[in-house]
Image (cartoon, rainbow, N blue to C red):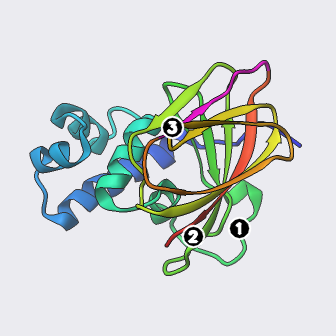
Amino acid sequence: MRNEIAIVAEPVDARLAARLAALRAEQGWSLDVLAERSGVSRATLSRLERGETSPTASLLGRLCTAYGRTMSGLIAEIETEPAQLLRRAEQTGWTDPETGFARRSVSPPAAGLRGELVEGTLPAGAVVSYDTPPIHGIEQHVWMLEGTLELMVDDVVHRLGPGDCLRYRLFGPTRFACPGPRPAHYLIALCKP
């Protein structure tokens, strides 16, 4: 199984920036209101919406929480034509510029459905933390494909290896860490409440 995730950086980043700006406008929020709700500085939000910088996984997680969306849901919203079948080459990928964490939305985007599959690859030594869940009470299943992942949920650290699957409902912070020496490669099934 390949560990690389094909990323088409510029078009995805440009569509993501436009969608973030549109979401704020749809809510009728000023940059100051969004900064207060997300804990992200006004200046950073402005640069993100203008496409001058790419969001980190942590920052995107905060914005998704403020908007009540999963990260996969937000990525799906920037897709141009949702389809029932999504070939690997058509699946949207994104890489965190800070940690190298790569995620790929495996499931075809679809409004109104509650389940999603996301592929993640976390480089050795990398750590990604989320302060709050995107949707309170969301159910997640993390199935390890390769490598080792230390996943903290509810202040409990679970060490996962190939073939292991951790199922939980998310109400608080999470922390994904790859102790190495190889990248952690896994699938997450998200089930909205």
Task: Using the image as rendered, state which of residue 61 and residue 92 is in the foreground.
Answer: 61
Instruction: Quote the CA–CA distance across marks 1 and 2.
Output: 9 Å
Are the residues flagged by discs 3 and 2 in contact, CB closer than 8 Å?
A: no
Task: Using the image as rendered, state which of residue 163 and residue 121 is in the foreground.
Answer: 163
Name the secondary structure under disc 3: loop
Which of pointers 3 and 2 lies earlier in the amino acid sequence? 2
Membership of 178 in magenta stretch:
yes
Amino acid type of disc 1? Leu
Seen in the image, is 22 located left or right of residue 93? left
In percent of the image, x 30 and y 39: which residue is there?
48
Q: Quadrant of residue 139?
A: bottom right
In percent of the image, x 67 and y 27: which residue is there?
178
Which of pointers 1 and 2 lies earlier in the amino acid sequence? 1
Residue 126 visible to the viewer: yes
Name the secondary structure under disc 1: loop
Instruction: Quote the CA–CA distance across marks 3 and 1.
Output: 36 Å
Amino acid type of disc 2? Pro
Question: Which mark is in front, 3 or 1?
Answer: 3
Residue 181 image point, x, y percent: 78, 18
Seen in the image, is 60 located left or right of residue 81? left
Residue 169, compared with residue 126, is above or below; it is below
Which of pointers 3 and 1 lies earlier in the amino acid sequence? 1
| Residue 86 numbered mark, or none | 1
The span shown in magenta is 174-181
Which residue is under mark 3?
A: 155
Are the residues flagged by discs 1 and 2 in contact, CB closer than 8 Å?
A: yes
Are the residues flagged by discs 3 and 1 in contact, CB closer than 8 Å?
A: no
Residue 55 visible to the viewer: no
| Residue 109 numbered mark, or none | 2
